Amino acid sequence: MADTVPSFGYPKFSLSEPRFDQKTYLGRLKRCLDVTDPRTLFVSEAIIHPDTGQKVFMPFRMSGYVPFGTVTVVGMLLPAPSLRTVIFWQWMNQSHNAAVNYSNRNASKPTPTSRFLLSYFGAVTSAVTIALGLTTLVKRAKISNLSMKALLQRLVAYPATGIVDVQFFLLSGSVLCVYLRVLACLCVRIRACVRM
């Protein structure tokens, strides 16, 4: 018990090894909860990136994702936005997501800057295009119920922000390609076994 913090029962912090046993579900869950806990924004050890050893700027830490992203979410849900407002808040959201993804990347394997730029511009372009298209569609729709129209306008943010998956796909596309090749090889082997 000497290696734990008395008030919480947590093991002492170390940059060289995981704080919790990553071989168990409970250990992985504790790590996830620990990394995303906003209270760790003010703990000096939590600001160091495990791969680079550099400080991670507070709004881009995993623990800062919700507190710093809330402003953007509120902006995207504003009623009756102009097209400029829609563009600004979608750009702001995707920029924050990109900064969080970059700041918390796996830096043990080098990733070309072009991959991050492709991911960022792809996500911004997709989110803005979808948000503008849906905003225009809702404004032009012949809906007599104004409260329904306002509700639909607020829902525009959801499919547009769901495009963050595009950013992940573009960033981890090389991993996906390897996965698909392995899957294709397995399918070929399974078919060969079935034919026997």
Image (spheres, helix red, strand yellow):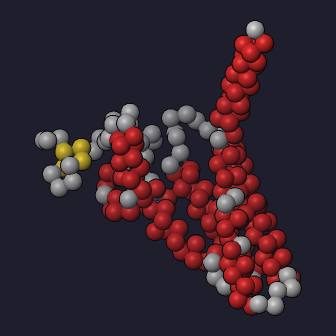
Please identify the quarter of the rendering in which residue 94 is found: bottom right
Which quarter of the image is occupied by the C terminus? top right
Please identify the quarter of the rendering in which residue 143 is found: bottom right
Which percent across, then down, holds residue 98? 61, 56
Q: Nearer the viewer, residue 188 or 130?
A: 188
Which percent across, then down, holds residue 158? 67, 67
Give the mark count. 0
In the image, residue 55 sits, relative to residue 162, either above or below, namely above
Q: Residue at x 66, y 53 (%)?
A: 165
Q: Is residue 40 left or right of residue 125?
A: left
Q: Nearer the viewer, residue 102 or 74?
A: 74
Q: Is residue 96 visible?
A: yes
Which percent across, then down, holds residue 25? 39, 40
Q: Residue at x 72, y 78 (%)?
A: 152
Which quarter of the image is occupied by the N terminus? top left
Q: Residue at x 31, y 41 (%)?
A: 19
